[in-house]
Image: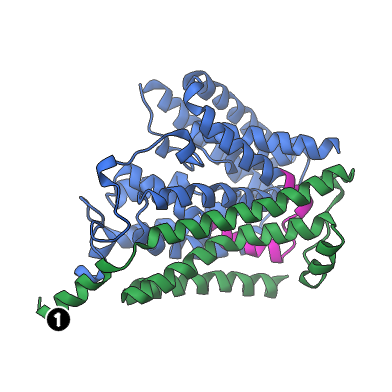
Chain colours: A green, B blue
Amino acid sequence: MTSSRRAEALEPALEPALEPALARVLQAGTYLSVGLVAVGSVLLIAGGGSPLAGGPALALSRLPADLLALRPEGFLWLGILGIVLTPALRVATALLGFWRRGERAMAGVAVLILAVVAAGVVSGLLAG
Amino acid sequence: MEVGLLMLAGGIAAGAFGSILGLGGGLLIVPLLTLGFGLPLREAVGVSLVCVIVTSSASAGVYLQRRQANLRLGMVLELFTAAGAVIGGAVAFLIDERLLAALFALLLIYVAVTMLQGLRKPAEEPATDDETPPHAHLAGESGVDPGAERDGRTKKDGPTELDGGFVAGLGGPGYEVTRLPAAALGSVGAGIASALLGIGGGLIKVPLMHLVLGVPLRVATATSNLMIGITASASAIVYLIRGGIDAYVAGPTAIGVFVGASLGSRLGHRVGQRGLRVLFVLVLVYTAIEMVRRAAGIA
């Protein structure tokens, strides 16, 4: 290994570890989302609503109005979206971290994972 | 109101049970919602995926903080589990619910047999089951050598891709990764199973990493937990867009599972595992029979 290559290989070792940052993303995303779902569940149950009555479908355009009106579905959908998107946010954070460290192959893997998730969105939209 | 509280209580029981036995919540949520509340199987799977993401994200955060999960290997494999999950999510809406019920019954029987075999051994590793106990930090289940506590920097990590090749960078301290293509293929299968049945897929991922790739069991367990989140997320997105998740059902159930998993991780070491496992095997067998009846169109 040449000295310049060795210096390049050692450089990432001076970067802060990625894992704690990813852990924070996962924990913050989870607790925030679970908090929103908890508020929505309390509003639903306290309001006498039955979960088996069939909740309204997700409509992003209605979300702000539902939240302002303290309707349970607003909090429930926002929380569920947060839960579902938190792992993707973790992957996006990892992508930035790997890129900064010069680990291009791992950054590429992260991009591909996000592309697969995006393919899921497209597949759902096309089929739905 | 009663139904909402019952759903919350059911979620707590499923989360606690799963956490104590190292199974996660996914395996129990689908039978709870279908057999207990009469929900269509596909809708129950969608809700179960949301619950699986909640418990996985919370516990994966802990495993990452402890530096117990192999981040690089996990991300490479989750590329394939996520691809499988998207395929499974699309297929789930094409196949008959009775076939899904039959597949679920097979899964339950497999887990029951595995647990029965585990009862014969003096100390069963939890990693051979589905997901690992959520919030393992609360359970005091360390699994990490105190000497391995990092200083917050990467100096003591295993090799990275810069140290000599991409695959070499996927290993960790004391082990190298082998037979990656076979594991990638198995990961696609794990993703499909997760999307079809609403489970985390640790049942497949942990043995795959441990037996095929040669990853130590504890690392495989922690890494599997990390992968479960994005796997379930990829298929949950498909369910979400196609109207396969009911927010009114998902809310109380997910909160219940989250609370139950936290309680389970606290109480786990105080509960007699053997008696609980016998009880759980009975529950699994009963549930499997009900799923077979549903598959046959009797229930």
Q: Residue furthest front?
A: B151
Instruction: Name the magenta segment's main secondary structure.
Output: helix
Q: Position of residue B1 (x, y in %)?
A: 86, 39
Label 1 environment density (alpha carbons within 10 Å; few <14, some 14–19, many ≥20): few
Q: Residue at x 57, y 73 (%)?
A: A118
Work out whether residue B96 or residue B254 is closer to the camera in this orientation and state it. B254
Q: Residue at x 54, y 26 (%)?
A: B281
Q: Residue furthest left?
A: A2
Q: Position of residue B236 (x, y in %)?
A: 63, 59
Label 1: element kind? helix
Q: Position of residue B195 (x, y in %)?
A: 58, 55
Quadrant in the picture for residue B29: top right
Three-letter amino acid code at the position of disc 1: Ser
Work out whether residue B224 or residue A49 is closer to the camera in this orientation and state it. A49
Would you say residue B88 is visible in this rendering?
A: no
Work out whether residue B47 or residue B39 is closer to the camera in this orientation and state it. B47
Does B248 lie within the magenta span? yes
Question: Label 1 marks which chain's residue?
Answer: A
Q: On the image, numbered disc 1 is attached to which residue?
A: A4
Q: Residue at x 25, y 66 (%)?
A: A13
Q: Residue at x 27, y 70 (%)?
A: A12
In this view, A98 is above or below B270: below
Q: Position of residue B278 (x, y in %)?
A: 52, 21
Q: Is residue B137 left or right of residue B261?
A: left
In this view, B167 is above or below B267: below
Quadrant in the picture for residue B162: bottom left
Does A21 lie within the magenta span? no
The total number of labels drawn is 1
Residue range in magenta is B231-252
